[in-house]
Image (cartoon, rainbow, N blue to C red):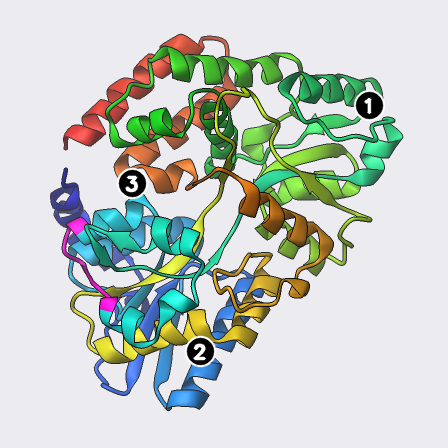
Amino acid sequence: MKFARILRATASALLLAMPMQLVAQASKAEEVTISHYFTGDLGLKGMQAFFEGFEKETGIAVKDSGIGHEDYKTGILVRAAANRLPDVFSYGAGARPQFVVDAGNVAPVDDIWDSAHLGDVVSKSIADSATIYNGKRYFIPVGYHYAGIFFNPKAMKTAGISEMPKTWDGLLAACKTLREHNIAPISLGSKSRWPAQFWFDYLLLGTAGPDYRNSLMRGDASFADSQVKRAMGMWKGLVDADCFAPNSNAKEWTDAADEVARGEAAMTLMGTWITGYWNNNKLQPVQDYDFFPFPKLDDAVPVSVVGPVDGFLVAANSQNPQGARKLLAFMVSNVPLQANWAKVQGALSPNTKVDPSIYDPVMKKALDTVSTAQNFAFNYDLATPPPVAEVGLDMFAEFMNDSSDVDALLERTQEGAKAAFAK
């Protein structure tokens, strides 16, 4: 299915409203233009370290244009529809790269993958799941994350919880104990909608399994199916049991992280980038925060881990396609800068040459969890086409506002998803 014609219809108006620097194109052969969503303090510094290292090694200048993550999601598609992409742009692996590949907006990178021997650098699981679209390499990964349940050890100790939950009943029991000690069990900052998706992802993957979930992401299954109703019913059970701190949709994910750090809440389900945020706030791994994997829900269902793979694509109309490819090969293959990126971002490196000793104990445990999982799944908004993702993200936010009639909510969501897939 193609959504590009919808984007083209609005591209001109939206481009006029965007700052001119966001749509500027490179005109110099010795320069590579790049846009990305790593605009936070730590992410921006990590990106700049890549660019400075590349310029020093090659003499090719990098013209950087960072854009806030939420604005980026729409802006990059508008620029693609108007054929005004930079040489290189960031994306999360999955349905979003597939979307721009199908629209003819990006160029394959098989040549640099082979000549730079990136198959010997990038872990096979990431290479197989994230880099290939329509039979060709398009995507160069620079880091990936894992979503787990991060918690405050001191809050757990206050409630007398010494063993972290491994089952759904265990999680419900822990929530009950925490409430009895006047500690909010779970903080969720879903103001931007996407933080809520991890609950849906794990509940559906853990009960219906990855094959069914893939069918739903493709539009071959329905949000009104019994499998989805079961997963949402479990989520509703947490809400009804007062497991979530109040006002989820009024808080960003950083607000939820702060509540956990202060001990006002015990847990939050979030990606490993939360460790970079906490480390920057002078919290200490293990002592001030730790994590445990999402509880196992059904012994007959393969264990899945969820998270995004961040990387870059080369625009089909790049003004400096060779420089762009060289930049991406450099970013994934330079071991010291990959290690730096992993540490400042709270990320895991796709580069197998990076020494695991760079990771603190919490991140090392996350790496081990991913390594032993039976399935790695991209989070919801990266696993289904962007217009469909918007429908689901709206559903999660609406659910956290009012979970009283899940069946009706799922029926409306299916109508929206069907319409989005049909466009």
Residue 106 is a magenta residue: yes
Indicate the amino acid at tag 1: Asn
Q: Residue at x 51, y 64 (%)?
A: 352
Q: Earlier in the sequence, mark 2 or mark 1?
A: 2
Indicate the amino acid at tag 2: Phe
Q: Residue at x 25, y 18 (%)?
A: 415
Indicate the amino acid at tag 3: Pro
Quarter of the figure with residue 355: bottom right
Question: Would you say 151 lies left or right of 222 here?
Answer: right
User: Where, quadrant-wise, is the N terminus in this rendering?
Assistant: top left
Q: Nearer the viewer, mark 2 or mark 1?
A: 2
The residue carrying mark 2 is 51
Q: Nearer the viewer, residue 172 or 213?
A: 213
The residue carrying mark 3 is 386
Q: Earlier in the sequence, mark 2 or mark 3?
A: 2
Question: Would you say 116 lies left or right of 254 here?
Answer: left
Q: Earlier in the sequence, mark 1 or mark 3?
A: 1
Q: Which residues are magenta?
A: 102-110
Q: CA distance from mark 2 to mark 3?
A: 29 Å
Residue 276 is a magenta residue: no
Q: Nearer the viewer, residue 282 or 68?
A: 282
Q: Residue at x 17, y 41 (%)?
A: 3
Q: CA distance from mark 1 to mark 3?
A: 40 Å
Q: Is residue 166 visible?
A: yes
The residue carrying mark 1 is 182
Relative to 296, is 290 above or below?
below
Q: Nearer the viewer, residue 332 or 78?
A: 332
Relative to 111, is 56 above or below?
below
